[in-house]
Amino acid sequence: MAIPPSPYGPYPPPVTSGGGYGSPSPRPTNGMAIASLVCAFLFAPLGILFGHISLSQIKRSGEEGHGIAIAGLVLSYLFTAFGIIALVLVVVWTAVVFQSFDKYVRDKYDDPGYPNATALPNAPASPLPTFVPPKTLGSNCQYPMTTEPASKPAQPPQSGRIATTPPIVAATIVTSGGAIGLQLDNAKAPCTVNNFTSLAKQGYFDGTPCHRLTTSAELGVLQCGDPTGSGTGGPGYRFPNEYPTNQYRLSDPALAVPVVYPRGTLAMANSGAGTNGSQFFLVYRDSTLPPTYTVFGTIDAPGLDVLNKIAAAGVQGGADDGKPVTRVIIRSVTVT
């Protein structure tokens, strides 16, 4: 039977699943948008990258997922910001902890460069150990920077291998109380002598005070080398101990047992192992100390006479440890 013609024109074509008057196929969701949202929780910076890529692709292709991409971007930016803030807080916290620990160590040693005399009452003392040159002596002298700035402008000395010859280097400290002649022991402590001569040639010690005098039964020393005169100053870098510390194993309990630093000894002050800087002390009377203070020279007889006069005047306030009554200023240090 024939189909009568439609008064309104031809009948529409049959509906097919691929188009015509049927429901259109759903557009796919952009994969990068999904990846952006997932990465927001796993690795936010990658989520930011994927989010921007997905928005660009959606704009070109007409895919779904615009809202997902926006959500991924927002979350990624938030988590990235929180991560940066957390990282900054961790860095600041670490710095505060390090400084607090450093201050604890300095306070523990009373920041004097040598222990309090009261810490060593009646302690048995033996002579300084016989020097046996370590195989690495002077092979790699290093002077790393410290967290504390230099108390007076100074450049670290030459690093690397330092010759142990000549074995003795002459130097003179001219103070307001007289000249103190030194024999620097380059053969035993090349890294330390290298540091002292470098600072001397830079004029680092010029115009600085000898800020601490000890006149107790256990200690007879004058300490110098701190431009601030407070006992806490230094050149802005540190370096390890040498003789006599290097004659012991690091775990050797003998490092805590006092030995005799004889009259006429020149030694480095420190506030713990490996914290040598610019401060040093001059021993005018046999003194008992743990072997953790680098010996790097000796003092001549006229220099000891100068030290004896300073010690005879005593310590301010009548104590046996503190600022000397006789104000001692280093005018210059020369090395020949």
Image (spheres, helix red, strand yellow):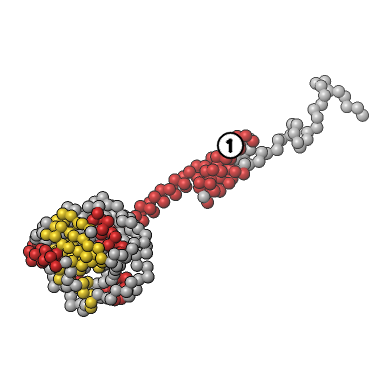
Q: Which of the 4 image quadrants contains residue 23?
A: top right
Q: Which of the 4 image quadrants contains residue 304?
A: bottom left
Name of the residue lying farthest toward the right: 1
Q: Name the residue rendered at 18%, 55% in the picture.
A: 332
Can residue 1 be seen here? The reply is yes
Instruction: Inspect the image, locate mark 1, and give the three-letter code of the amino acid beneath it.
Output: Ser
Tell how many labels. Answer: 1
- Residue occupied by mark 1: 56
- Between 200 and 321, the residue placed more toward the observer is 200
Can residue 71 be seen here? The reply is no
- Between 53 and 233, the residue placed more toward the observer is 233
> Residue 88's spot in the image, x, y percent?
39, 50
Q: Name the residue rendered at 23%, 56% in the picture.
A: 200
Q: Which of the 4 image quadrants contains residue 256?
A: bottom left
- On screen, residue 11 versus residue 37, left or right, reads right
Q: Name the residue rendered at 18%, 77% in the picture.
A: 122
> Residue 50's spot in the image, x, y percent?
56, 43
Secondary structure found at label 1: helix
Q: Name the residue rendered at 29%, 52% in the picture.
A: 155
- On screen, residue 56 versus residue 90, left or right, reads right
Q: Image quadrant for the C terminus?
A: bottom left
Q: Residues within 10 Å of mark 1 (few under 14, many from 20)?
A: some
Q: Image quadrant for the N terminus?
A: top right
Name of the residue lying farthest toward the top: 7
> Residue 258's spot in the image, x, y percent?
23, 74
- Between 105 and 168, the residue placed more toward the observer is 168
